Amino acid sequence: MDAEVLIIGAGPAGLAVAGALVQRGVTPLVIEQADAVASSWRNHYERLHLHTVKSHSALPGVPFPSSYPRYVPRQALVDYLADYAQRHRIEPRLGEEAAAIARIDGGWQVATRAGMRYTARRVVLATGANCEPRVPAIAGRAGYRGRVLHSRDYRNAAPFIGQRVLVVGMGNTGAEIALDLVEQGVQAALSVRSPVNIVHRDVLGRPTQLTSILLAKLPAAWGDAIATMFRKLTVGDLSPWGLQTAAVSPLRQLREHGKTPVIDVGTLARIKRGEIKVHPGIDRFTPDGLRFVDGSEQAFDAVILATGYAPTLQRLFPGLALTLDRHGAPADVIGQGASAGLCFVGFDIRQPGGVLRTIHAQALRVADALAQPSADRSRPRQTTATT
């Protein structure tokens, strides 16, 4: 079988690998289920900015323009990713959603929902950790008269003007959506069931991201102790406002649980001013709102579930048990054993400095592995499925 490289996904991870391969003289084939590159970023909520500095967020070989601000806004990132694809002549086959992947003749066959079959000796999975929305089952939802949506479907505050909105979950998405709502005059609240780690995006003008990268280079106990001290000094005790602080440091929470701390860009100040009320976890829906675990009830016109995503990788491999961690992420970037020939980029969310910084490093590693001189650099073959 001819040596071939097929990349699934044309978001930042897929484009990063494709760009790094092109820079090494290898032309991969990229397939993408949506109708454009960077589709997820095109559909994120409008006020979104990167929480990581642009110098640590660019893809291989192409820094962000000097005119871009330190924290790149969503649309500017979309423009950058589209330009990155054009510069490297990356032309994904759009509307091709991978449905099943199986071992064949020493390589891999990828079947798409559109009826195509691709064969490749090397396949790069770049569909990302945020693939399938997590929607918790909450009692009483069928009887609730308001609107319920996942944060994936939130764009801006306009549809919620004049309403009472509960945002469920205080990760970065939930915290920023609640902030977006109140900035536009919407009466918004948060439901937070677990202790949280909150850090300010900048402290005395220095990005917290850069500090976390330095602390991660120290012995774990030292880095954790310093991170905890900084959190206490800059954020402090939030229990008077209904928020419990995690027992572990932000670094340890990221390292061991894959949970990014909340990078505060103004939500905390709104909570302290009473503009965003914090409720505990949810017990059940009521016809007009929700009942919380402390027995209190509150009426809401809409509920936004900022409850995260799952990578759902295993369902693409009906005949192979992938080696995944407890979060459903691959154990390694470059597959071994039964997974040899597979690479996984963009799923590791445990590294300090943000996922785009991690994608950059992983893309270079994968491209180096796939561009070995012994590799045959022909394009993947494709055939139309027959019955």
Image (spheres, rainbow, N blue to C red):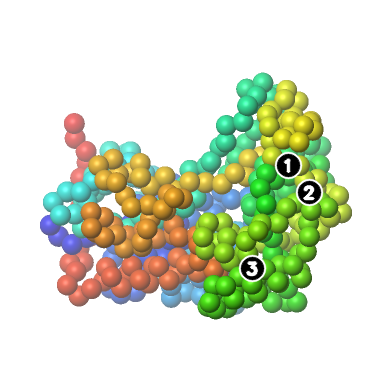
Image coords of residue 317 (percent x, y): 30, 44
Q: What element carries label 1?
A: loop
Image coords of residue 381 (percent x, y): 20, 53
Tell me if 120 is positioned left or right of 167 in this view: left
Q: Identify the image quadrant of the C terminus.
A: top left
Residue at the disc numbered 2: 242
Q: Nearer the viewer, residue 250 or 132?
A: 250
Residue at the disc numbered 3: 71
Few, some or many residues within 10 Å of mark 3 (<14, 14–19, 20+) = some
Q: Identify the image quadrant of the N terminus.
A: bottom left
At x 62%, y 36%, the residue is 149
Residue type, label 3: Tyr
- Where on the picture, by quarter, is residue 67? bottom right
Residue at the disc numbered 1: 280
Q: Is residue 344 visible?
A: yes
Image coords of residue 20 (percent x, y): 36, 70
Residue type, label 1: Pro
At x 26%, y 55%, the residue is 339
Tell me if 26 is positioned left or right of 291 in this view: left
Query: Mark 2 touching mark 1, by CB under 8 A?
Result: yes
Q: Is mark 3 on a helix, strand or loop?
A: loop
